[in-house]
Image (spheres, helix red, strand yellow):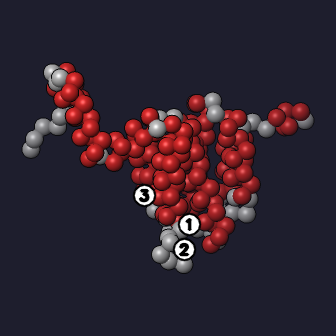
Amino acid sequence: MAKKLTKKQLENHLQHLEKKELLAEVSKLFTRVEQVREYYQMEFGGKAEREKVLADYKKQIRSQFYSSRSASPRMPKAAELRKIINAFKKVAVVQYDVVDLMLYRVETAVEFTNDFGDIDQSFYQSTIKTYCDALQLIDKEKLHSYFNDRCEQIVDDASGIGWGFYDTLWEFFHFYFPDEESDEA
């Protein structure tokens, strides 16, 4: 079995390349690897290009819940949803976009439940985990003012959902976005 190329070995190889050869290598990666194209599109393409790539990933998330080929609901697989989000994390250049996609996944799960009725507990647990991960990233990156209303709307939209789903979302929301009104009482 061949040994895996290490980052250090790659760096050593690249240091010996002429500028023209290095440009050819990057161009080859850009041509052959979709994630490299998406990364550079987000890095150098400006806001409109970032939004375009994000929209593609949102479409992938949505298709896990709502199939355009079938009128009946499609039970989404948590592993597939995680895979989509993790792939996006590799190409995203700003954490705001990662939070946006994570919240979109949660919003779509809430919408799906409201459309088709209660799902199983593992569905809710994976959705809660994504919501909590998004809130932690919001907190880490200090993005509260950008996402407060949206995170609260998710909780409001989940108000009729069982399995303790609403209650858990509510608790996480109020932990990361403390309710100022409760301080006045």
Among the two numbered marks 3 and 1 on one chain, the one whose residue lies closer to the N terminus: 3
Residue occupying the far right of the picture = 185
Q: Name the kind of residue labelled 3 in the image.
A: Glu
- Which SS class for mark 3? helix
Among the two numbered marks 2 and 3 on one chain, the one whose residue lies closer to the N terminus: 2
Quarter assignment of residue 148: top right
Among the two numbered marks 1 and 2 on one chain, the one whose residue lies closer to the N terminus: 2
**In-front residue for pair 123/56:** 56
Q: Nearer the viewer, mark 1 or mark 2?
A: 2
Residue pointed to by mark 1: 120
Residue pointed to by mark 3: 80
Q: Position of residue 74 (x, y in %)?
A: 50, 71
- Disc 2 and disc 3: Cα gap in Å? 16 Å
Name which residue lies at 9% across and 44% down: 1
Q: Residues within 10 Å of mark 3 (few under 14, many from 20)?
A: few
Name which residue lies at 42% across and 56% down: 79
Quarter assignment of residue 178: top right
Q: Is residue 150 visible?
A: yes
- Asked if the residue under mark 3 is in contact with the one under mark 2, i.e. CB atoms within 8 Å, the reply is no
Quarter assignment of residue 142: top right
Residue pointed to by mark 2: 73
Q: Name the kind of residue labelled 1 in the image.
A: Asp
Q: Name the kind of residue labelled 2 in the image.
A: Pro
**In-front residue for pair 179/144:** 144
**In-front residue for pair 42/11:** 42
In the image, 159: left or right of 143?
Answer: right
In the image, 180: left or right of 132?
Answer: right
- Disc 1 and disc 2: Cα gap in Å? 14 Å
